[in-house]
Image (cartoon, grey):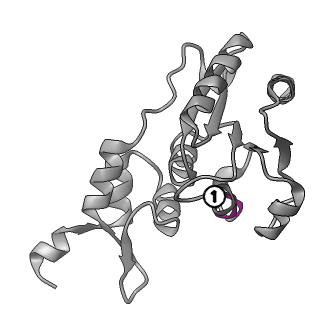
Amino acid sequence: MTSAQISAYCTTREAAKVLGVTLRTVQLWVDSGILEAWKTEGGHRRISVASVQRLQTGAPPPYVTTQGANERLKVLVVEDDNVLLKLYKLRIAAWNMPIDVATASNGYEALMRVGRDSPDLMIADLNMPGMDGFEMIRNLMTSSFREGMEIIIVTGMDADEIARKGGLPATIKVLPKPVPFNDLRQIAEQLMARRAAL
């Protein structure tokens, strides 16, 4: 391999430093295909510098909070319909609760957000372009990032359709579309109450 080819790749540690995330986050992004990489004969990951740069420039900013991080609930909404994403933001803002809302339009973006921001609650669709909700959930189930994060699926699919596509873990609550905002508000309130009791 030439020196130019070598410089086109970096180590997991170097990628983590550039992106400002943990080694585990970089490993998850590699395993999910978000970062392009290959493994050496010794099993070490070599990550494409170009893919790190793309992620660095295209990555969404971290949550912006006006209170302490422990006082606010971080919610990630994963939905490919931009109109519906705006509706989520408007309706959740109307709850007048200490909530920070971030959004992602597919599973890849959602995994980046989860690795970077550790949301308390994820509200996600299943039918999305690129990485759909099923693949995203499978990735999260093998990751430590889901620990402490509640996942709610809001979908137009019925139980039979979900089962045909491989189903979902029993721990994940599924709600039907149109989006049941009252149910989501109750879930957010319960999460905040549990945190306050700790």
Magenta residues: mostly which secondary structure? Answer: helix
Disc 1 crowd, CA 10 A, few/some/many (<14, 14-19, 20+): some
Give x and y (percent) for residue 59. 39, 42
Q: Quadrant of residue 136?
A: bottom right
Is the residue 147 above or below the residue 84 in the image?
Answer: below
Residue 67 placed where, x, y %? Answer: 59, 14
Give 164 or 149, whichever is nearer the viewer: 164
On screen, residue 194 versus residue 37, left or right, reads right
**Is residue 78 covered in magenta?**
no
Q: Residue at x 54, y 48 (%)?
A: 115
- Magenta stretch in the rendered image: 137-141
Q: Which residue is mark 1?
A: 136
- Residue at image position (69%, 40%) is 122
| Residue 42 at x, y percent in the picture | 40, 86
Quadrant location of residue 104?
A: top right
Looking at the image, which is closer to me, 143 or 33? 33
